[in-house]
Image: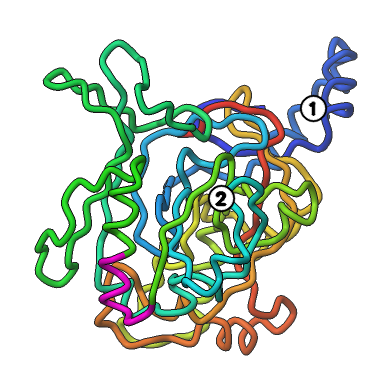
Amino acid sequence: REEGGRIIHSISVTTLDLIYEYGEDRRTMGLYHTLIHGLSLGKVSGLYRYAVKGLSADTLEQVQLVEAGAFPDDRRFALIKEPSTKSFDPQNPEWLHKENFLCVFTDPHLLARFRASYSIRTCQDGTDPNQLTKYGTPCDTITSEIDGTSGRFLTLFERSTGEKVLDQLDMSRQEGQQALAEFFSKQSGIPLVCVTATNHQFGNTSSGWKQKEDTRTIHIVNESTVKALESAIGKDNLILNPTRFRPNVVVQNDKLRPFSEFDWIGKSIQCGPALQLDVISKAVRCQGVNIDPLDPQQSEVDIPGLLAKHFPEHGPYLGVYAVVKRGGQIS
């Protein structure tokens, strides 16, 4: 276990407790330190939350996570295609494939045109008059000292011009959700409905649902893997940013082997003194990551095909999914 934002493997709680219990023996303590420092994964270099499935991320400084939770409001909202609404029950939500939604899988070019900004606001005295359901503790809580406004506010900008096209939609209210759906229905030419549900994340992976019938996961990307792919492609002026892969957490360590995140599956990783994540599966990449969200005008790159070509032993996979085993803070 290490502090200062470093993530390490937790071999197993039992093993670590046993080593610590007999730590008075110098040989045991030496083994303990060797294990801890030898398994250091690196530091967290980025934290990201995507309030609306398919829209751009908010960069976060720190996040408080609870057991079995997701990043606060990560993929809390989604724009579902109207015919698919019959497959979604907000009172009893289940995982649905991304083909049912407007997202970077179904229309990456459209969504790359816009940049979103999202914030959670609560009243000054800490009350929440709208009885909003929180995923963990909001990490971007804003106290309004003027009018006590409480809600979940989304602003949307045209990326190329910086023009504000939607201003402070309160996504905690039906009016805000409807306005977002109407805007993108017009932009896409597809009837859409904005949906949300308590303790539900509209994520891409079904891993969490298959394991524990809970869609909430944390997506982790190893920066070394991204750099290895960029180098293998060898295209002039091509820079692959880890945010292209829509992660929640980016881990940076120049000594971390590319694709070594796949070795974490079935194991636990720890960040700081409390937070512990169980890594459950690989992340398969789709055509939605072929466009750079930071530079949509850049030529498309066939990421899944290039992963399979240059790293056939891994196929079209990059990054992993984890669930929160024990709550805590990450920064």
Is 297 one of the magenta-colored residues?
no
Does dot 1 land on a helix, a strand or a loop? helix
* Side of 137 where 69 appears, left or right: right
* Side of 127 where 275 appears, left or right: right
Q: Position of residue 140 (x, y in %)?
A: 34, 33
- What's the residue at 66%, 35% (across, down)? 270
Is 185 one of the magenta-colored residues?
yes
* Mark 1 burial class by Cα count in 10 Å: few <14, some 14-19, many 20+: some
* Side of 297 where 107 appears, left or right: right
Q: Are marks 2 and 1 in contact (CB under 8 Å)?
A: no
**Of the pair 150 and 50, the residue shown nearer to us:** 150
| Above-or-below relation of 22 to 210 | above
Q: Amino acid at mark 1?
A: Tyr
**Of the pair 99 and 228, the residue shown nearer to us:** 99
**Of the pair 96 and 10, the residue shown nearer to us:** 96
| Above-or-below relation of 100 to 52 | below
The residue that label 1 is drawn on is: 32
- What's the residue at 82%, 28% (across, down)? 13
Q: CA distance from mark 2 to mark 1?
A: 38 Å
What is the number of the mark on residue 205? none
- What's the residue at 67%, 55% (across, down)? 94
Dominant SS type (magenta) = helix
Split into 4 quadrants, where in the image is the C terminus?
A: top left
**Of the pair 114 and 152, the residue shown nearer to us:** 152
| Above-or-below relation of 275 to 161 | above
Magenta-highlighted residues: 182-190
Split into 4 quadrants, where in the image is the N terminus?
A: top right
Q: Position of residue 25 (x, y in %)?
A: 89, 14
- What's the residue at 58%, 74% (across, down)? 285
The residue that label 2 is drawn on is: 201
Q: Amino acid at mark 2?
A: Gln
Does dot 2 land on a helix, a strand or a loop? loop
